[in-house]
Amino acid sequence: MAAAPGKCFLVTGPPGAGFYTREIREGIERVGFEVVTLDGRKAPLASTIISTSESTRWPTVGKYKVDIASFEAVALPELQIKEDTDLFIIDEVGKMELFSSSFFPAVLKVLESNIPLFASIPIPKLGRDIPAVTRLRNHPGAKIFTLSPSNRDAVREQIYTQLVDSLSEQ
């Protein structure tokens, strides 16, 4: 079963145009990112400063080492379908998150549930997209909103209206 039309809202755009990403900083230098749940639980996602014997085997994105186990411990329970779930929010379905072999299957289960999904996805770099992101973009129930610094306020209103409509249909 696929998500009903209007149940998958994807936001994309250049960095800084849409979502706030929780950065880890030391002074003015960004040294990593953390995953944060809506109820405030958090764990490291990626870092330039973690150095353990285990971290030498972690995948990298640019200068960041991705802590898959930490990410999964916090993110995967949030993607479990529960009776009282009205909306799933994911920031983001991107390269770091997709190093988890369990993350994208959990996202697909959300899509199959017909519970609305609101997620951010990266813009393709150099014309190339991440295969899992392409799959989301091409999903029959997906509505894609491309943000820019000049349109983000207007698009925010569109997204809000369509999300509210989607939630009221449940």
Image (spheres, rainbow, N blue to C red):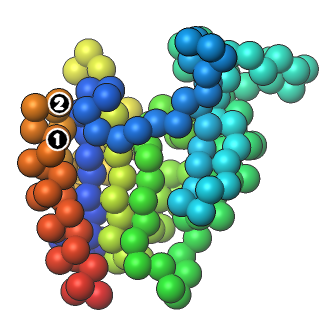
Left or right, 40 with reference to 124: right
Residue with the most extreme right position: 53
The amino acid at mark 2 is Pro
- Tell me if mark 1 has few (under 14), some (14-19) or many (20+) residues whose alpha carbon lies within 10 angstroms of its own: some
Q: Are marks 2 and 1 in contact (CB under 8 Å)?
A: yes
Q: Badge 2: few (under 14), some or many (20 or more) residues near its Cα, within 10 Å? A: few
Secondary structure found at label 2:
loop
Res 6 quadrant in image: bottom left
82 over 70 or under it: above or below: below
Q: Is residue 159 above or below residue 20?
A: below
Q: Which quadrant: the C terminus?
A: bottom left
Relative image position of residue 90 (x, y in whole percent)? 44, 53
Residue 131, percent across and down? Answer: 37, 37
Residue 124 seen in render:
no
Question: Looking at the image, which residue is at 82% across and 17% down?
Answer: 51
Q: Residue at x 10, y 38 (%)?
A: 151
SS category of the residue bearing label 1: helix
Which residue occupies the foreground of this view, 148 or 94? 148
**Quarter of the image where one finds residue 117:** bottom left
The numbered dot on residue 152 is: 1
Image disc number at residue 149: 2
The answer to whether residue 14 is visible is yes
